[in-house]
Image (cartoon, rainbow, N blue to C red):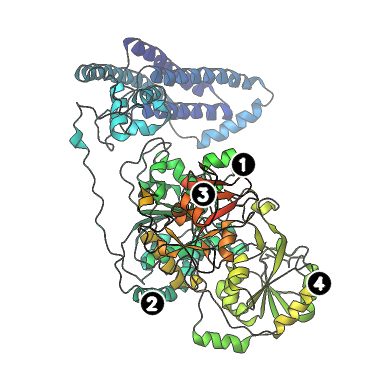
Amino acid sequence: SAGPSDLQFSARLLEPLSLAFGLMSQIALLSVSLSCRIFVVGIGFFSLCFLMTSLGGQFSAKRPGDSPFTMRAEVLGGQESRGVLRKICDMLEVIMKRMDVLSKLGNTTDTHRLDELSSALDRIQPIGLVERIQAIAQNMSDMAVRVEQILQRSMAYNRVRDGAFGQCEIPKDPRYPDCPSKMDWMRARWTSDPCYAFYGVDGSDCSFLIYLSEVEWFCPPLAWRNQTTTPTLKPPPKRQAVFQSDIGALMEQVGTGKESLSFMKRRIRRLAAQWASAARRLDDKLRNHWREQKRILVHVGFLTEESGDVFSPKVLKGGPLGEMVQWADILTALHVLGHNLKISFSLKELHGFLGVPPGRGSCPLTGPLPFDLIYTDYHGLQQMKQLMGLSLRKHKCHIRVIDTFGTEPAYNHEEYATLHGYRTNWGYWNLHGQQYMTMFPHTPDNSFMGFVAEELNETERLNIQKNKVKNMAVVYGKETNMWKGKEKFLAILHRHMEIHGTVYYEAQRPPEVPAFVKNHGLLPQQELQQLLRKAKLFIGFGFPYEGPAPLEAIANGCIFLQPKFNPPHSSLNHEFFRGKPTSREVSSQHPYAEQYIGRPHVITIDFNNSEEFDATIREIMRINVEPFLPYEYTCEGMLERLHAYIQNQDFCSPEAPFPPVNSSQTWLGSAPSPFNLLPNSRILTWASNASSFSSWPPLTALRVVASLESESCVKACQTAGLICEPALYRFINIRETFSALDFQCEGVESEKNHLFPAFSAEHAECSLQQDPLLFSCAGSSAKYRRLCPCRDFRNGQVALCKDCL
């Protein structure tokens, strides 16, 4: 609170303001130069603004007990007032020095030029400028008196308050051991973020205790506070989600103003009928099963101005569209599934939706998180941290991160990544691995979100097969730099086929594109579809990696020819992947197409082998293929997958401990174990007579495999025709798994290591995982044979097990 010395000091500092502005008005009357006139006007305006913002900002602190939305005028006492007033005094000194310099300008040889400019200014300057400055000076003098009155009232209030509340001593409660240290922190740093003042903190111990006991939870509730003022908020009632086909409300929420948004809206509109038809089929499949409607926020961080948004300006110039394709499909799928959807494309919208108090993110939200799920990207996640601060840690279980290339657990675990060299500019968020959602199912540690490609009706399929031009090829590459160094195999291709390109250019044909290539320029989506429906071959040059275009080409009856990478590209040997939170090795331009589709629709060869390349082109001209689209990339497939995630994935509720207490008593058989060995194999299943535990995917899908040395669980499960499932790791992270697989353990230890649980043959050691965040399908070592939780999967839908719906 302010004392008598503060009042005297404030009055002394504010008195020069009146004198300074009086002096400025006199200088304005004497000034004959343009520079002096502009300077005087600037000084008056700047000084007034400075005082109003500096002092005015100090009048906004709230008193304890006020509603978070009620603001009162109150001046900060002591050091804060002195600091502001000293700034004003220092500013006036600088003003006086600059005036002295400008007064010498009349003695220079440029006086006649200034006179000319001065007379020109006389004809346009506002009437009564000097009178206005004099009025400002008088107002400043009045303000000094007003400040003194407010300070006096503040002192009187503090005396009354201290008499009512006492000194608000720090309670000594063993249940709140951090209370004293938090009080010390608040005393030293409460002005570091305006959010504390928003919640009523005013620099007094009482306000600190109220904040730390009612807004945060570091101190015990105060007996003299009326605790009924904060009602307990009940969760909103559960509602049923109903499929919806009308996209009008969605289109309105997406908004306008950017070419990226226009692109997304065109895509949503073009596929609307397919989404509606898919929703009807899925509804029939689910037999009208009750689905809970979720409150969902979608924040597209990479398209915000605050993130730089390099994508929107390039939409019409050949820039990447894959991310916008995926986001458009995510928005449509969530809308069609019938959820309560809010969409944000700016920091301002995000701030409003989350209920974030003003400031720098040091304080909790003003109420409970108003969403069940939040879909965003890495840019959006960083923006949420900026806005939410510590609240993000509490609510991060609700977040789903759309992540094109995937994030492996070793990179996601902040402490582990820092200690073991996995720290990158991304990752390190300590999320559950399956909260990251990828464009293709290449990282089983993450969830597979995907996108959709347009489906053909039967008439369109027949027309494509009739109208295919057997010697027509389209090159996958919209940017000129993708064509550099490709002359050799383009020349071979040209001997057999007519080559078409869709390279963006403004005025002149890009020189990187050979003259024998028919370049159409950048084509709208529908015209590109027509081109693909005629072409026999869609050929990739090795970049971009894992885009949507090859699937669209295959869906339109093209054969996709792509280069094989030897050695595979990864963060260890390729600049594009360096810094990405994954150690995944990419064996070709489009590994999904190579692994999950394959011949005859997808052919992967070494482009550096001219003979093999020539022979493959001849083979392609002889092959006839039908349009093909994997079920998981249809509208129905994406709706089915997203529905399963929303209704079954839960990273907020604590998992029941496993194994439970006295677990060995629940395992039946001569060698107590929850596993059975499949006949004629080395694969374990969950025993049907073992205790059942709540899990998704269910334990009926579990297949336990031991990897070879230097083999990851991703590879071990693939070799067995299965998918690695990290959600089931906790059920095999027990010593009984080693004995069931005939591993002889001389000792069993628990440690933080993303390769565990694993068996070391060299030392006969069995190692269990200590930290569930490090359960990882990725990773291998020559020292270990890893225990791998695999599962079966639905035909055409690798993200879901057979019993997952």
Name the amino acid type tagged 1. Gly
Q: CA distance from mark 1 to mark 3?
A: 23 Å
Name the amino acid type tagged 2. Arg
User: Which residue is under mark 3?
Assistant: 379
Pointer 1: residues within 10 angstroms few (<14), some, or many (20+)?
Answer: few
Disc nearest the viewer among 1 and 4:
1
User: Which residue is under mark 1?
Assistant: 421
- Give the label on residue 621, or none: none
Q: Position of residue 787 (x, y in %)?
A: 53, 54
User: Which residue is under mark 2?
Assistant: 281
Circle 4: element type:
helix
> Image check: 704 left or right of 804?
right
Tell me what residue is drawn at x 40 percent, y 51 percent.
Answer: 651
Name the amino acid type tagged 4. Ser
Residue 541 visible in the displayed image: no
Q: CA distance from mark 3 to mark 2?
A: 35 Å
Q: CA distance from mark 1 to mark 4?
A: 41 Å
Query: 324 and 249: which one is in front?
Result: 324
User: Which residue is under mark 4?
Assistant: 610
Circle 2: element type:
helix
